[in-house]
Amino acid sequence: MDEAAGMIAGIEPSVERGLACVRIANRHGEALVYLHGAHLASWRPTGQREVLWTSARSAYQSDKPIRGGVPICWPWFGAHPERAELPAHGFARTRAWAFAGGSTRADGATSVAFVLRDDAATRALWPRPLRLRYQVTVGPALELRLQTTSADDRPFSLGGALHTYFAISDVRAIGITGLRGATYIDRMRDSARETEQHERLTIATETDRIYDSTTACALDDPGWSRTIAIAKTGSRSTVVWNPWIAKAARMADFGDDEWPGMVCIETANAGDASIAVQPYGYHDLVARIEVQGR
């Protein structure tokens, strides 16, 4: 990693679990981002609990995604729509990104940026020039910005997600607001289309839903006396996921008893909600996450 990272106040290069990473620390909080997948693994606002969940059984290997934090799903979400043999959720989360610098703002916020360029391996999966930039800002809120820039004279469809795993007191006690009235694909019911009827969505079984939603939502966690507000732009979907008991037991990188402590609320373009990127255009997928105490 460029040694200049350590010359910017609040930014420190490091190695954790055998992988290169960048640590951020300022008056607003602390964060940890691995260069592997540009993976945000930890965010702890000052005076608060950890916001992001990571499995104790996660792999930390160059060819595997990290289970937890904020994996970057790109340039498709889930299975590839045409080629089932390609990796689920694309390839950005398992590629080595390059540190592209950092900066500080007048309000004390700290930003770090990472870039991913195409090579022979990516072109075998995605036969286009690749220009991907990811910026993580730790300030009064956590800001995540994934920018896709086209270097191609052909338009293309883009999917993906900031696949955020939230740490929670107990999934059976939390509620998610802001999705009432949104239609969704229920992947636990053969992808049936439903409409959310509840003002406060609760989870009492395995849940895997893709909501057609461009609006903000909130995670209410009474057990930890906090609400996490999630705003977004450039996103046409919100994905809600918890594996519950049986699926957690089937996953090698997920502890059998870890499912109560997490829920995914993902800023996404998933299912039918892909983004059309025009020749030499760009798309920004942005999430802003803020912890609000009670």
Image: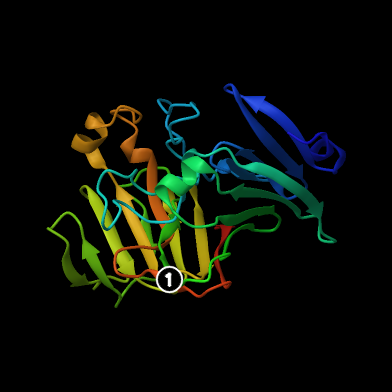
Q: Quadrant of the N terminus?
A: top right
Image point (72%, 41%), residue name:
24
Q: Is residue 57 left or right of residue 23?
A: left
Q: Quadrant of residue 262?
A: top left
Q: Which residue is mark 1?
A: 275
Answer above or below: position of 244 versus 142: above
Where does residue 84 sit, x and y in percent of width and height? 24, 48
The residue sitting at 35% across, 59% down in the picture is: 239
Quadrant including the C terminus: bottom right
Q: Is residue 96 above or below residue 201?
A: above
Q: How many marks?
A: 1
The percent position of residue 99, horizontal first and vertical second, equals 70, 43
| Amino acid identity at mark 1 | Ile
Dividing the picture into quarters, in which one does residue 151 lie? bottom right
Looking at the image, is 36 positioned above or below residue 272? above
131 or 133: nearer the viewer: 131
> In the drawing, does residue 254 fall left or right of residue 35?
left
Q: Residue furthest bottom?
A: 181
Q: Nearer the viewer, residue 269 or 264?
A: 269
Is residue 167 visible in the rendered structure shown here?
no
| Residue 188 in view (yes/no) | yes
Q: Position of residue 165 (x, y in %)?
A: 44, 46
